[in-house]
Image (tube, rainbow, N blue to C red):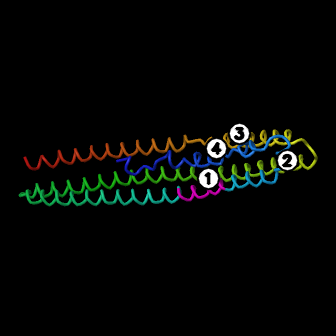
Amino acid sequence: MTSNFKENTINVLGLSFVALLLLISPKLALAANTNNQFCDNIDITITQINKQVDIKINNVTNKKTEQLQTLKNRREERNLLIQKQRSESDRQMVLRIEKLYKYAKTPVQKQAVEKFKNEVSNAIATRRAAIDQAIQTYRKTLDAVFDENRTVIDTVVKNFQAETAKALNQAKVECNQQSTGKIARQRLMAKSQTAQKHLTLALKFNTQPATQAAEALEEATEEATKTFNQALQKAQTELSKAFR
C-alpha cells in the first residue's frame, strides 16, 4: 500500500542530477585554439562558452519546472487512487453489514451486528487518519528538502556563472595585455576546471531527511494496518459469539 502513494524520493531529489547538466566543458571549446591562436579567437571562444552555459542553465530551469509538475501530477494521481480504494472498501463494508443484518434473527444478534459495524467503522477511520497524517508529514518533509535543493541549485548556478564570466574576462584582459595565448589559455582552462569542481562539490545534497521521512511513512502505515487488523479480529470474534 505504501508504494502506491509514496513519492519517488530519488526522482524528486534528482535535481542534483539535473544540475550536473551544468558541468559544461569549456576546455572543449579551448582545444581548437592553441597558443597565440587562442588570443586571436578570444571573442569567438567567449561567445561559444557563454552559449554553452546559457543552454545548460535553460535546461536546468526547464527540468526543474517539469519536475515540479511531475510531483504535483503524481500526488494527484495517488490521491485519486487512495480515494478509489477507500470507496471500494466502503462499498464492500456496506454489503457485508447488509448480509449480516439478514442473518441476524434475534435482538442479541442484531445488536452484535450494530456493535460490529460501529467498531469496524471506528477502526477504519482511525487507520485512515493515521495514514493520512503520515502521508502529510512525509510530503512536507519532501517538499522542504526539494525547496532547499532548488535554492542551492539557484545559488550554485549564479556562482558558476560568475566564476565562468570572471575567468573569461580575465583571459581577455591577459590577451589584450599582450600575454601569450598559451598562458591565457592555460589559466582559463584551470579556472574553468575549478569552477566545475566547485559546482560538483556544491551539488552533493543531503538526502537523509527524505530517506528517513520515507521510512517513517512506511513504519506508520504498517503500524496503522496492524492496529486495524487487531481491532477487526477482536470485533469479528465478538460478533461470532452472538451467532453460535
In the rendered structure, are the residues bearing label 2 and label 3 in contact, judged by CB atoms less than 8 Å apart? no
Q: Nearer the viewer, mark 2 or mark 4?
A: 2
2 or 3: mark nearer the eye: 2
Residue 224 image point, x, y percent: 35, 46
Figure quadrant of residue 132: bottom left
Mark closest to the chain's N terminus, 1 or 4: 1
Residue sitting at x 93%, y 45%:
178
Instruction: State the residue at coordinates (75%, 44%).
Output: 32
Amino acid at circle 3: Lys
Residue 62 lies left or right of residue 198; in this view the side is left
Pinpoint residue 242: horizontal percent, then vertical percent. 11, 50
Front: mark 1 or 3? 3
Q: CA distance from mark 1 to mark 3?
A: 19 Å
Precedes in sequence: disc 1 or disc 3: 1
Residue topped by disc 1? 150
Kind of residue at badge 1: Arg
Which portion, as a residue range, is magenta? 55-66
At x 89% / y 41%, what residue is drawn? 180
Answer with the quarter of the image where residue 230 lies: top left
- Specify the label residue 39 is tagged with: 2
Q: CA distance from mark 3 to mark 4?
A: 10 Å
**Mark 2 or mark 4, earlier in chain:** 2
Say which residue label 3 marks. Answer: 197
Q: Do residues under tags 2 and 4 come within 8 Å of each other at their CB atoms?
A: no
Looking at marks 1 and 2 on the same chain, the residue that comes earlier in the sequence is marked by: 2
Q: Which kind of residue does numbered mark 4 sit on?
A: Leu
- Residue 125 x %, y %: 32, 56
- Residue that label 4 marks: 203
| Residue 75 rendering spot, x and y as whole percentages | 44, 57
